[in-house]
Image (tube, rainbow, N blue to C red):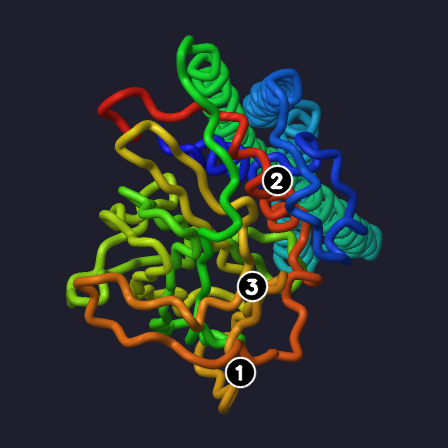
């Protein structure tokens, strides 16, 4: 298996549930973590994270069920607001009928007064006029009752409808929360399963541990310290064998992580990393374990350059990013090892359409060994990169929040507890 697979697993778990996995606080993001002092999460810690994710998911499912029940209740005939709305509507209808009857009484009283014959007595005329006045007063009162009943009915209907809308929105939010909790649970379960697989492989008899090799270095050049959303940025990854022995296969490792300015929103779906051999024009996606195809027989003191491409979707908000690089080696005689640390190159993400002007290269989080005296690997077409990396003056890592910090904190120090690959297989 590839010795850094456990690192990719731990990174995934840290990005998914950083606070649960590493007990990180917001203050953790204010300073760059020291990768080499951190150990990979233990099985007990991953089991705790998986159990916590399961509990959150169970709570989310229960909350969604309660929200569904509340929505159903809000739409039922027995719901108090529904009953009140129906009663108010009935009262308004009764008031409308009473108003119609009162108006008709006025019409009839007016007609009776008009139809009095000339021979009618003063008493008869006075009685007809009194009846009309009383009918008009009753009609006015009925109108006031109807107006009040209509307003009460409208208010009751609004209250019922508002409650139903709120219940429907609550269901929508509950379903989103359930989906997010399920995603977290799935990631935590997968991290635990992979860690158990690694632990099982560690127990194989007759296999040697892979070892750290500080002279297997990875250096990024040409990655700007500010990347504009909606653009593609090409840069170079140099893998150098600074030892005095040939490495039969070297696996370059690269992983990009980004958040918005707040550090709370993961932009993982909006940043993409591709690679291409120096002599090829074909771009390939970095695989889901963050590896590229192996470099065959990297001689002592030699290096190989890979073309890299970082794409940030136009929809990405302004934020911060870091590209981690490292390398592993495998020899035909069964020995193996890799870079002891992840090297992180920090950059800012500018909103689409921004014009940052001339910017310096992204700088690594720790000092890189000098590889300028290493000769190119035979067969590669790229020329050596000379000079040192320029300082950007920006501290994007200090602005990354928990997920980014947790990913870096795990570091490559967790890598070398895993066993070397089984005969004939890197995976």
Q: Residue at x 26, y 32 (%)?
A: 332
The residue singled out by tag 2 in the image is 410
Q: Can residue 116 be seen in this view?
A: no
Which circle's residue, 1 or 2, is located before the other in the chain? 1
The image shows residue 133 at horizontal and vertical percentages of: 80, 55
User: Where the N terminus falls, by quadrant?
Assistant: top left
328 vs 164, left or right, is left
As measured in the structure, the alpha-carbon distance from the residue carrying label 3 to the one carrying label 2 is 19 Å
Where does residue 155 sit, x and y in percent of width and height? 70, 45
Residue farthest along the bottom direction in this orientation: 357
The residue lying at 65 percent from left, 61 percent from top is 397
Q: In this view, does 67 lie to the left or right of 326?
A: right
Quadrant assignment, res 335: top left
According to the image, label 3 marks what residue?
Answer: 368
Q: Is mark 3 on a helix, strand or loop?
A: loop
**Residue bearing mark 1:** 360
- Tell me whether the residue at label 3 lies in contact with that at label 2, contact meaning CB atoms closer than 8 angstroms: no
Mark 3–mark 1 distance (CA, rounded to whole Å): 17 Å
Q: What element carries label 2?
A: helix
């Amino acid at each position: 298996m590839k010795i850094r697979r456990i690192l990719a697993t731990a990174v995934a778990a840290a990005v998914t549930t950083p606070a649960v996995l590493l007990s990180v606080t917001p203050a953790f993001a204010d300073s760059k973590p020291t990768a080499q002092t951190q150990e990979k999460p233990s099985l007990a810690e991953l089991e705790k994270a998986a159990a916590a994710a399961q509990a959150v998911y169970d709570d989310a499912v229960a909350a969604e069920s309660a929200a569904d029940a509340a929505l159903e209740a809000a739409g039922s005939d027995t719901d108090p607001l529904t009953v009140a709305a129906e009663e108010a509507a009935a009262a308004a209808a009764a008031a409308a009928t009473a108003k119609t009857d009162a108006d008709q009484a006025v019409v009839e009283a007016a007609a009776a007064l008009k139809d009095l014959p000339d021979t009618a007595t003063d008493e008869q005329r006075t009685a007809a006029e009194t009846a009309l006045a009383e009918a008009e007063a009753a009609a006015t009162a009925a109108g006031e009752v109807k107006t009040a009943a209509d307003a009460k009915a409208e208010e009751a209907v609004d209250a019922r409808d508002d409650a139903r809308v709120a219940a429907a929105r609550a269901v929508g939010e509950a379903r989103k929360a359930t989906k997010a909790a399920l995603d977290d649970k799935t990631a935590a379960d997968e991290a635990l399963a992979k860690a158990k697989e690694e632990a099982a492989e560690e127990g194989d008899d007759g296999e040697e541990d892979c070892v750290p090799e500080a002279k297997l270095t990875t250096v990024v050049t040409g990655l700007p310290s500010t990347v504009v959303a909606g653009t593609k940025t090409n840069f170079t990854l140099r893998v150098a064998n600074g030892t005095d022995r040939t490495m039969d296969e070297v696996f370059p490792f690269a992983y990009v992580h980004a958040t918005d300015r707040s550090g709370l929103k993961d932009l993982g779906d909006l940043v993409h990393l591709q690679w291409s051999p120096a002599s090829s024009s074909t771009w390939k996606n970095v695989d889901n374990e963050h590896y590229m195809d192996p470099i065959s027989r990297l001689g002592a003191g030699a290096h190989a350059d890979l073309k890299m491409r970082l794409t940030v979707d136009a929809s990405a908000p302004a934020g911060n990013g870091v590209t981690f690089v490292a390398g592993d080696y495998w020899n035909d005689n069964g020995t193996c090892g890799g870079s002891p640390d992840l090297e992180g190159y920090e950059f800012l993400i500018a909103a689409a359409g921004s014009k940052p002007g001339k910017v310096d290269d992204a700088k690594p989080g720790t000092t890189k060994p000098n590889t300028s005296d290493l000769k190119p690997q035979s067969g590669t077409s790229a020329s050596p990169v000379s000079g040192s990396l320029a300082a950007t003056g920006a501290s994007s890592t200090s602005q990354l929040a928990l997920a980014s910090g947790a990913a870096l904190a795990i570091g490559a120090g967790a890598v070398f507890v895993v066993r070397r690959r089984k005969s004939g297989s890197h995976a």
